[in-house]
DNA sequence: CCTCATTCCTGCGGGC
DNA sequence: TGCCCGCAGGAATGAG
């Protein structure tokens, strides 16, 4: 599933292949892909025709493409979204949702999304920072991210650590996979209450979050080729580096205890029962 | 304001 | 064989 490292890999690919190109036509193949664009799919296509892409930016799991008009195309990959560059004569993907053609007749940009949790929209005047995503916190790879501010906000929360890590208004870019990996590195169970974390412990956790995201970005950066913007979180270039996520029953790389899986928010959490003991008094999932 | 459950969606794999 | 169900899960939304 695309989290920050996967989205950053896509951002880098788009920066290489679409910046400076002028859009000629946009084809919306599925209305759900532009459901966040309130004026509708026809307006989405109209307002983009003739515009030139001037950059590719990212905050957390959101991407946006500033345009020469001062507007921006906002993109979110959801669970299964891909942004692909394909030759114009390449066959349509089964789940092709939106197609961008360019004036240079070079490769098309295609938004492909099986489960349609992702989507695109145009933010009026949003080139610098789209208002639609202003509520998303800076991500920990952002030079302006405040470590102390994060720690203070985290400790003010009355919730559990993993819930807080997944809250994109507190820290962005972290999803289920990297939350579990950071918690494993920090030897913390995700059900630990945030307000019981000491400042130093919270800072250490943040360091692990940043480390795991950074390592994954490095691996993602090595894996995509030419005209294909790699967004396939499932193919798993980082899979071999995961210590806990998806490894139920396998030995913890640190202590050998079998990794456990617990129900969490209609999904799963993976952790080491020995390195990451459940906090006292927490209910079993 | 804060926290949390619900909902959207489709392909895959396990069970019967 | 074929059907059903659970699972994968980011984030907007509304309830409390």
Image (spheres, coloured by chain):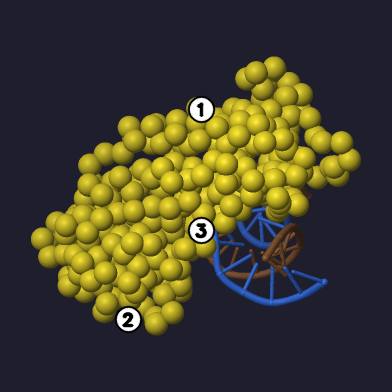
Chain colours: A yellow, B brown, C blue
Q: What residue is drawn where x is 73% and y is 21%?
A: A257
Chain letter, disc 2 residue: A
Residue at 41 percent of width and 72 percent of height: A34
**Which residue is at the far left?**
A104
Separation of disc 2 and disc 3 at Cα?
25 Å
Give percent across and percent down for residue A144: 43, 46
Q: Which mark is residue A255?
A: none
Residue A125 drawn at (x, y percent): 32, 72
The residue drawn where x is 48% and y is 51% is: A138
Same subunit, labels 1 and 3: the answer reads: yes
Image mark 1: chain: A
What number is the disc on residue A136? 3
**Quadrant of the image occupied by residue A250:** top right
Mark nearest the camera among 1 and 3 is 3
Q: Earlier in the sequence, mark 1 or mark 3?
A: 3
Residue B12: % across, % down: 54, 48
Q: Is residue A193 visible?
A: yes
Camera-side residue of A285 and A135: A135
Q: In which image quadrant can residue A49 be found? A: bottom left
Is disc 1 in the same subunit as disc 2?
A: yes
Q: Is residue A192 left or right of residue A177?
A: right
| Residue at which label 1 appears | A241
Name the chain letter of the residue that bears numbered label 3.
A
User: Are both tags, 2 and 3, on one chain?
Assistant: yes
Q: Residue at x 61, y 28 (%)?
A: A185
Please, what secondary structure does the residue beneath circle 3 have? loop
Q: Earlier in the sequence, mark 2 or mark 3?
A: 2
Determine which of the numbered discs, if any, sits on residue A43 in the image: 2
Which of pointers 1 and 2 lies earlier in the amino acid sequence? 2
The residue lying toward the viewer, choosing from A138 and A109, is A138
- A50 sits left or right of A211 in the view: left
Q: Secondary structure at mark 2?
A: helix
């Amino acid at each position: 599933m695309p989290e920050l490292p996967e989205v950053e890999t896509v951002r880098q690919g788009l920066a290489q292949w679409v910046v400076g190109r002028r859009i000629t036509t946009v084809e919306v193949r599925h209305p759900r892909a532009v459901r966040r664009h309130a004026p509708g799919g026809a307006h989405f296509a109209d307002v983009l025709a003739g515009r030139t892409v001037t950059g590719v930016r990212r905050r957390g799991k959101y991407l946006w493409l500033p345009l020469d008009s001062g507007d921006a195309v906002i993109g979110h990959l959801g669970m299964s979204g891909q942004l692909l560059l394909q030759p114009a004569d390449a066959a349509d993907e089964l789940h092709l949702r939106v197609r961008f053609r360019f004036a240079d007749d070079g490769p098309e940009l295609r938004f492909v999304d099986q489960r349609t949790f992702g989507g695109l929209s145009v933010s009026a005047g949003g080139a610098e920072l789209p208002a639609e995503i202003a509520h998303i916190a800076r991500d920990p790879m952002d030079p302006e991210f405040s470590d102390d501010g994060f720690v203070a906000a985290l400790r003010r929360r009355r919730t559990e650590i993993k819930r807080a890590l997944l809250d994109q208004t507190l820290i962005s870019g972290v999803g289920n996979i990297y939350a579990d990996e950071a918690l494993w590195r920090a030897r913390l169970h995700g059900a630990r209450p945030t307000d019981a974390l000491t400042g130093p412990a919270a800072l250490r956790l943040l360091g692990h979050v940043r480390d795991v995201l950074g390592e994954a970005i490095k691996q993602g950066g090595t894996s995509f080729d030419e005209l294909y913007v790699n967004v396939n979180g499932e193919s798993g270039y980082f899979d071999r580096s995961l210590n806990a996520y998806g490894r139920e029953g396998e030995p913890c790389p640190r202590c050998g205890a079998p990794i456990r899986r617990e129900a969490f928010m209609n999904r799963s959490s993976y952790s080491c029962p020995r390195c990451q003991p459940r906090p006292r008094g927490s209910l079993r999932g």
